[in-house]
Amino acid sequence: MTAVDSPDEDTARRGVTGRWRRPRRDRWLIVAIVVAVLAVAAGSWAVLDGRAGDDAASTTAPTASPTTSAPAGTGRASTPPAPTGTVTPGATPTGQRGAGPVPRGSAATTSTPAAQPWLAYQLLWPFRDAAQARDWQAAGGGHQPWHLDAGLTALDFARGYLALSGIDRVTTRQIGTTDAHVGVGFARPEGYGDATAGVVHLVRLGAGSDAPWEVVGTRDADFSLLTPRYGTRYASPVTVGGRITGVDENIHVQVRQPSSARPIGESCCLPAGGTNQGWSTRVTYRDAQDPVLTVVAWTGGHLVAVERFTVTALLPVPAS
């Protein structure tokens, strides 16, 4: 027989508000189920987190590329600096095309202190060596004071020592502390201004503001002298050549030394022309006495006798 709640028991379950009140055992059952679900979820999260940690631990970190570090306390790269103050045989000196100095007295590299820049070049004129320049300095510079003027020295080199006709003025100046490039030339006919025949390269021969200027070569453009190579030793006869740009040119070549008033070798005249065309001739020189000879080549005849010139340094072979 089925039990039926009495009206009094049903009233007690609904309470005074008239709402149904769930028995306490049902509420505790729900709480237990919720706690169980949360416990299962927590366990699953822990397992997944553990696996993730294992995967992270087993991953190899990328290897950083090697870098070059500076030595401690220096702030500089560990690569050693390039050596300075040396002259390599055959290297082209600054401002001179197709000409490389040979260290004097040795085929090995020669130290060139910053205070002695002339050691990188051959001394052409007016001094034969540094001793002569020191003697001039010691005398106070009163004799031939033009040695202190790069422009006058360059001009006297062209029209005096080389005897180039018509070169009578300085056209450009680029003068530094220890070296200079001075353009010398002539006046164009009919008042068309000055023309530069050549750019003479000079260096200070000695120390101090009273060190005299010394010619060591020329800076060339469209007329160059490439053979013999600057500062190399050649026996006579010697092949002389280079490159030229021009029309109907006639190249005249001489070999000179400071101790002689006249050239000790000469060749004239070689027809040349075109754009950057090569030229070459043979010159025989005799009675070479000085340690360094000057080979000069010039061309002209359109406006004046000498319109362009170029020089190089030749070391003579002693006569046997």
Image: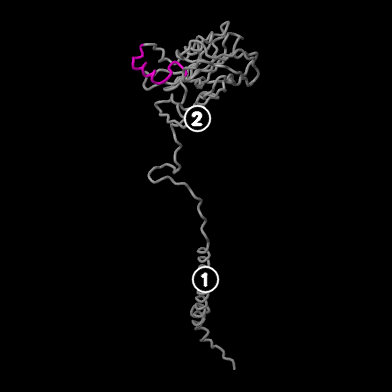
- Seen from the viewer's position, the closer of residues 10 and 2 is 2
- Seen from the viewer's position, the closer of residues 253 and 171 is 253
Q: Secondary structure at mark 1?
A: helix
Mark 1 surroundings within 10 Å by alpha-carbon count, few (fewer than 14), some (14 through 19), many (20 or more): few
The residue that disc 1 covers is: 47
What x and y, as percent, mark residue 247?
A: 65, 14
Is label 2 or label 1 in front?
A: 2
The residue that disc 2 covers is: 89
Task: Tell me which segment is drawn in magenta.
Answer: 124-142
Residue that extends furthest to the top in the rendered view of this protein: 190
Q: Is residue 297 magenta?
A: no
- Mark 2 residue type: Pro
Sequence-first tag of 2 and 1: 1
Q: Is residue 136 magenta?
A: yes
- Mark 1 residue type: Val
Give the CA distance from mark 2 to mark 1.
Answer: 77 Å
Residue that extends furthest to the bottom in the rendered view of this protein: 1
Please state, as top left, top right, bottom left or bottom right, where the N terminus lies in the image: bottom right
- Seen from the viewer's position, the closer of residues 150 and 311 is 311
**Above or below, 244 relative to 80:** above
User: What residue sits 48% from the left and 13% below the top?
Assistant: 157
**Above or below, 212 relative to 20:** above
Identify the mark at residue 260; answer none if there is no mark: none
What x and y, as percent, mark residue 153?
A: 45, 14
